[in-house]
Image: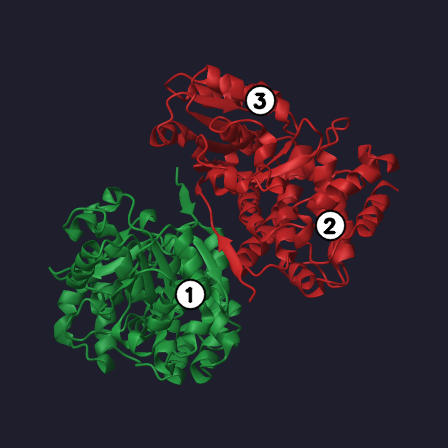
Chain colours: A red, B green
């Protein structure tokens, strides 16, 4: 017998002004000494200080989350958390600070090493109660605010997923007003991340009609708003749709992703390039849609219909045009990836947790061919 | 600022054969001496014994859940639970055993009286950890398997809702194969319950696009399968769609229901008639759709489109025809409700928790008019 298993997630407060509820949420979670985690770019905008000032009690700040979170940075933040006697974490930023906070929350209450808890090493059952995390996303893309997973690049090299309901933020404060200051290119790249989550989870072969309905709505919503959000940063309606699409994509994770993410994760582990996850996904998506077409024609047609694409325009072609309109890099070559990197990337993609839910079986020759196309 | 709040729910195992995972789920939840709760009709079919026989250790059975669960029955089951030293509950049946089990689980770990925990009396924060409940639905309609609420008729008269995340079943084993023995009229009535959940939560004015997407899919799914499931009880495809629609409707509860349920709950509290909740909803739905039309024209048009209704057929009219096709009572008069009962029913509907999320304000004159139309 084949059984489907599903599970929905954590509490969300959504809307312009949601971030203002942070002090109340800290009190509700009984967090008296939070560690704020964010990145230098966001601190420079003043947003982190503004949120920090809204908190009455003592706070600490770790402001050095790397673009792709690393084990070394997690250990540094953990040391600060323990030294300062913190009792919870506020994650402010995009997917990197959110994932990062989850890993710090894990190691704040569990013995080292981090690798022991990786899903790939059967670590999920070893994850017990973690420090509470409040997620305050400042991009609309990651979905990590409603997700159970965190991707961390280990000191030993690979970018691995850590996944457990224990890692869910206790609450996500999803405030579209925080995203109006996001620069156009980052709006586009993070938005394409959300769109790729919706499309990939929709194409996953697992049975979960509730997720299918959510991510189809998310894909439609992101498709309809991403150009406007990029071109008119202050358009709160478009920002609201993008933030909802991010959540909807995150609710899709439980159905599994596919080849886009299997190919994208190893790229994020390349320390030499520091590639943006959303930009990688955007560049990879058209090629993967062409690859998946024979195995997922019906679902791709449903997406085509939901996005309101004209007859005669393929979904892959429309995504490629969207990337171009948004000013995103169109290939991995444009992002600095070279043919010499492909063997290592292929090993990473083969081991990736997103590979098994791609609608078309994805072997090493397929991965090699896709990477080769994208660096050509 | 207006903020939307949402939250998804518990773990589900879905598919033909899901009920066979019960022993493993009992072990996973560390339940060594479960109280099984069900109703006499279901026990007579042999299903309860079959499930009971699959459990290796000691079990107890409470087989007298009333069609609309009462406080007196809850207290009787609680006494059995405590006397037998039970450590968890398996609820087998439709919405009544499922809601009933939640109330027993509450009182197994909390002091009396039950009324103290009613949402209407601000009781939700008083609900702490409850005994674990495993839900095994045998109808496709209630949604209680994935819901935080339980409706219980108190000894003092009113039918009140008890609502807390603590009341969520630890897991719902949703096995469409259990529903193939459900008689046609019960299939139809419980199916209309699921459909009414999907339609009412879709029409609720709260902001929750993820729920909107889910329940629109649920409405489409129920609409497409209910005639087949009723006419061909052994059609597992139709049974599967109905069970998924039940879950999808239950996931919609957090967005709130509306006038159908506000009018239906007091009918369930009428001890003299013992009315079926789904049949009440079915009979009420067309009148409420007409009442709501001025306030929810856009959303009703979306439903019309999602259900694939022909142009020129109104949704209310199509629901009335569906009721007739299914052999369900078309009015409350046909079910024994009289004009003399209306004043009491109106008081109940005014106080009901579903009233505030009806898309059109629902005052006492409106309620009176709707009940009057339905008993005429």
**Does B187 sit above or below residue A338?**
below
Specify few, some or many for label 2: CA neighbours under 10 Å numbering under 14, 14-19, or 20 or more.
many
Picture coordinates of residue A81, whole percent (x, y):
48, 20
Q: Confirm whether circles 2 and 1 share one chain.
A: no
Q: Position of residue A151 (x, y in %)?
A: 62, 36
- How far across and how far down the image is residue B112, in percent? 15, 49
Q: Quadrant of the N terminus of chain A?
A: bottom right
Q: Is residue A91 left or right of residue B171?
A: right
The CA distance from mark 2 to mark 3 is 39 Å
Q: Foreground: A2 or B281?
A: A2
Q: Which residue is mark 1?
A: B246
What is the CA distance from the residue labelled 2 to the residue labelled 1? 35 Å
Q: Secondary structure at mark 2?
A: helix
**Where is mark 2, residue-wise?**
A319
- Kindly identify which numbered label has been placed on residue A75: 3
Position of residue A282 relative to residue A185, above or below, is: below
Q: Residue furthest front?
A: B57
Residue A125 image label = none
Circles 2 and 3: CB atoms closer than 8 Å = no
Give the spatial CA distance, label 1 vs label 3: 46 Å
Chain of the residue under the numbered disc 3 shown in the image: A
């Amino acid at each position: 017998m084949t059984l489907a298993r599903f599970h929905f997630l954590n509490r969300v407060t959504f809307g312009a002004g949601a971030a203002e509820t942070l002090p109340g949420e800290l009190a509700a979670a009984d967090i008296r000494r939070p560690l704020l985690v964010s990145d230098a770019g966001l601190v420079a905008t003043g947003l982190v200080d503004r949120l920090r000032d809204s908190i009455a009690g003592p706070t600490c700040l770790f402001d050095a989350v790397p673009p792709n979170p690393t084990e070394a940075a997690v250990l540094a933040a953990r040391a600060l958390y323990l030294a300062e006697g913190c009792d919870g974490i506020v994650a402010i930023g995009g997917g990197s600070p959110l994932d990062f906070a989850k890993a710090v929350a894990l190691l704040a209450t569990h013995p080292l090493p981090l690798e022991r808890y990786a899903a790939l090493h059967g670590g999920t059952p070893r994850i017990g109660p973690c420090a509470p995390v409040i997620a305050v996303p400042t991009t609309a893309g990651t979905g990590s605010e409603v997700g159970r997973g965190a991707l961390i690049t280990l000191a030993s090299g690979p970018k691995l997923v850590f996944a457990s309901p224990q890692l869910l933020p206790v609450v996500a404060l999803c405030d579209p007003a925080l995203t109006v200051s996001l620069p156009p290119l980052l709006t586009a790249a993070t938005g394409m991340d959300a769109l790729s989550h919706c499309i990939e989870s929709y194409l996953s072969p697992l049975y979960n009609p509730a997720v299918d309905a959510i991510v189809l709505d998310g894909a439609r919503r992101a498709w309809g708003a991403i150009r406007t959000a990029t071109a008119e940063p202050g358009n709160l309606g478009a920002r609201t749709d993008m933030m909802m699409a991010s959540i909807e994509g995150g609710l899709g994770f439980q159905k599994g992703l596919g080849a886009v993410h299997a190919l994208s994760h190893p790229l994020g582990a390349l320390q030499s390039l520091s590639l943006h996850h959303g930009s990688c996904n955007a560049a990879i998506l058209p090629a993967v849609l062409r690859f998946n077409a024979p195995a997922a024609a019906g679902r791709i047609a449903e997406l085509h219909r939901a996005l309101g694409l004209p007859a005669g325009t393929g979904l892959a072609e429309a995504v490629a045009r969207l990337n171009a309109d948004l000013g995103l890099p169109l290939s991995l070559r444009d992002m600095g990836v070279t043919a010499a990197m492909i063997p290592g990337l292929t090993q990473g993609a083969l081991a990736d947790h997103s590979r098994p839910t791609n609608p078309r079986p994805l072997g090493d020759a397929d991965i090699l061919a896709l990477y080769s196309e994208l660096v050509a």
